[in-house]
Image: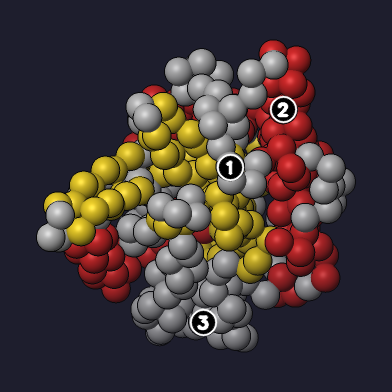
Amino acid sequence: MAAATLAIMGCKAPKLSGYAEKSNLSSKAKYDVSTATIRDNGRGFTVDFAKLKKPAQKIALVSFYTEDPGITKKSGTRSTGQTIRTSNTSQEGVEQFSNYFYKTGYTSMDQAFNANGMDILTPTEFLTSDDKKRYYKSFVVKHSDLNKIGGKLSKFLKKMGNAGTTLESKGAADGFIVCNLTTNHALADAKKKSVNANGGVGILDDKLIQSLGYDLCKELDVDAVIVVTNTMVCDNKHRQARHFLSAVSMYMFGPNPLPLAEGKKDNMFYSKGLFYSGYRMAFKKGLCIDPKIKDEGKRAENDVKNAKAYNNMITSIANKMCDEIKQK
């Protein structure tokens, strides 16, 4: 990764490398999608795996990206004068981090699903025709009017709290697109270097699950799709950048196995696409990725531990998702 992006800086926060020896982090992965499982008439937001005619086996990893909502730090008082400083990871930076996380964690994630009879396909594997390539490259996740209203409100509140800025960045690993799972604007805690959950991903967003779970699955000819997001923040101190991993999330979407009854019309309670699963592993305090380490040998050792830690996280989430599917 580019030295400018992963500069080695001072850092007193908990470190990403501290999770290198914690191989089972399943307990930290929390369910993060709607609990409204479909009824016998197909209405609902989340699949009942018992109602699938066959388990999802061919699953496309359609989005693997990193997001940084930006942080704002304030100092001073109104009487003495306030200083407001905002920072985030650059667009180039989030794309580089996405490539790093993907190259670090994909193999472990793939092996976890393979061990449970599911094949994870990357863009080079599921984009088998020009039509599929065109559709995928131009694909944009749709959102319900309710979600859009929430997005506008959260943007307004963030703008007020950040003294006029909605600084944020999102970027995918090479070959992937960014699938925005919500229009809500996340708020970061500048002191804890963490990002607050925004109420789950599209809990009542029927257009989200339709576009990802049905439209995209149909066009790509797969049983389900997966989106992985890495949430981080960047703090610039003394003109130097420190990066903190706040959360790793994984979501699966697929078709509704129950057709709508004849004569009935689609509405927000029936969708041709559904949530299949979704977990978010968040940390109360952001994990410093690039602490200040002067010794080159120890710096290299920390890099190895970072990779091992991220592998533990994404593997634990994948295992948690697979366990849920098998149990149901």
Label 3, label 2: how far apart the Cα atoms are: 49 Å
Q: Nearer the viewer, mark 3 or mark 2?
A: 2
Between 252 and 94, the one lying in front of the other is 94
Tell me how far mark 2 sits from mark 1, CA to CA. Answer: 15 Å
In this rendering, the answer to whether 325 lies above or below 107 is: below
| Mark 2, secondary structure of its residue | helix
Q: Could you say where residue 180 lies in the image, as x and y percent from the top left? A: 40, 50
- Circles 2 and 1: CB atoms closer than 8 Å: no
User: Label 2: which residue?
Assistant: 302
Q: Could you tell which of marks 3 and 2 lies nearer the N-terminus? A: 3
Q: Which residue is mark 1?
A: 12
Residue at disc 1, secondary structure: loop
Left or right of 122: which side holds 302?
right
Q: Residue at x 40, y 34 (%)?
A: 237
Residue type for callout 3 = Arg
**Whether residue 236 is visible:** yes
Residue 26: which quarter of the image?
bottom right
On screen, residue 80 versus residue 191, left or right, reads: left
Circle 2: residue type = Asn
Residue drawn at the location 28% of the way across and 43% of the way down: 86
